[in-house]
Amino acid sequence: MSSDGSKKQFWKRNAAKVPGSIQHVYGAQHPPFDPLLHANLIKAGSKPSPSTPGKPKKATTFQEFESITSDAWDVGDDDDELLAMAAQNLNIEVVMETANKVIENHSKLQERQKLDDTTESPQRGDDDTQEVEDEEEEDDEDDRVEEGDLTSPEVLFPFQSSPDTEGRLVKSHSEAPIGSSKETAGEHAALYRQRSLPHRPPVIPLVARMADQNTSGTPAMTEREASRLDKFKQLLAGPNTDLEELRKLSWSGIPRQVRPITWKLLSGYLPANAERRDNVLQRKRQEYFGFIQQYYDSRNDEHHQDTYRQIHIDIPRTNPLIPLFQQASVQEIFERILFIWAIRHPASGYVQGINDLVTPFFVVYVFEYIEEEVENFDVSSLQEEALRNIEADSFWCMSKLLDGIQDNYTFAQPGIQRKVKALEELVSRIDESVHHHMQHYEVEYLQFAFRWMNNLLMRELPLRCTIRLWDTYQAEPEGFSHFHLYVCAAFLVRWRKEILEERDFQGLMILLQNLPTMHWGNEEVSVLLAEAYRLKFAFADAPNHYKR
């Protein structure tokens, strides 16, 4: 069968079935989307040059660079070794070497911890006990397969440098020859399971994993985490919060206890001056509910019916596996937020995908009022004032986010098209094998990366990972509009082994639309962000490097 025929049959059979397929991301005010035609139009047209926003201030010494990023990469025991390089002037080679060393040391640390756990297990002597032990070992192996072997360095730390990198800046552990190790078996089992439709119910919470401090739940904090929380509290307690210091501290993740106030400050919703915050909150919340009184009744008017109907259809599809978002009161809150935003932004109106962008803010601001897990929390148990505050705060912070990426959602979504083209050019530079492999099987980046840009990877990652990702996006200058490109590039290359194993168009598309991230947590996201930062440092100030 020809490649074109395979592509047409794939879209015909799967466009309506694959969750979040490209045909589903356009809203009421946009025309239907033909991915093949759209990709051909872009290929035939002029190539938009990747947008390069204002240059971020460069670190000039390694000390400055290390002070900014050590928390993000959890340097730990490597501090002395890294600071010995402080006399060197910072350049790209230093950044690359440092990033590789830090990520490699993470991997070695995980291996040592895993070995220690194995040696500390009690020894058993008699035959009956040994038989039980063998059974438990088999069960443990099954668990690792079931969980994608979360402790495996191959899963946690995919970005490793190697002498034979073939000129790429990024190289994965998984590029090594396929063996019969438990880790490889676990990855394949997880990949096969996630790509099977329909999906099995998740075996861990989607909002929080107990191992992921700072996201949800109340596991015991380590000494380092307690120290970081104290730093946040001290910084936030002052009469005027130093937003630059807050961004540096937030880059590597924000503790759950202070995440609501930190997000409001970093988004620009609240002022740095502590005395003004209560007045600003009261005024903005009243302003939002003034919009509700003024506009919400018009949702049934003829010129707003299409917008409201599309919102009403999309809300139940928002995180359908999380019971919190299936509650009627929560869906009503989302309908009001999205409708008010749409009619106040007529240039774009409502577009499918914007509904996803409300959820991280809503979850984070619910945590401001509860201590327990949020997934199954009944929001009707909250006081009405608390619910109103959560709704208004979510609206304003989502609006702040969308202000920076609104060209993603105007007619024909030119912002997304530019970013997808920039992603293609970037990947062609950092991993030619992956790029040429997709070209060989005629996979257009727009066919899978459109959703990555439209939904900010929210359909590719569990919500707990999105919240951790957004900690860094809000701390990073132009995080949602610019840094996201480098995260997408690092994310794509993370799956290079699986991509290169697929030998047809259909297999590649199913893989790229169902990547096995169900068991990801803070550690995986932190390594992804470290790799994205390395790519940004190498390419952000040198846009000509995109091109050959």
Image: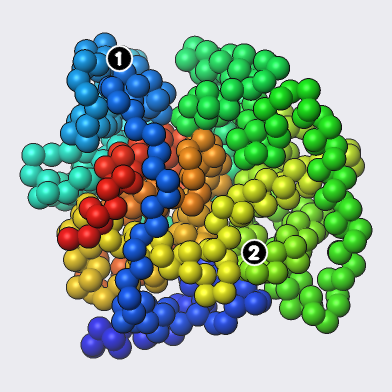
Image x and y of residue 279, in percent: 84, 32
43 left or right of 296 in image? left
Viewer-nearest residue: 259 or 177: 259
Image x and y of residue 415, in percent: 48, 64
- Choose top left, top right, bottom left or bottom right for residue 350: bottom right
Viewer-nearest residue: 177 or 421: 421
Residue matched to label 2:
317
Image x and y of residue 25, in percent: 55, 70
Q: Residues within 10 Å of mark 1 (few under 14, many from 20)?
A: few
Nearer the observer: mark 1 or 2; the answer is 1
On the question of residue 193 being in view, the answer is no
Residue at 86% x, 64% y: name it. 296
Residue matched to label 1:
79
Disc 2 element: helix
What colouring method underlies this structural image?
rainbow
Residue at 83% x, 71% y: name it. 299
Mark 1 or mark 2, which has the lower sequence index? 1
**How far is disc 1 from disc 2 in space, using C-alphas?**
46 Å
Task: Name the quarter where the C terminus is drawn.
Answer: bottom left
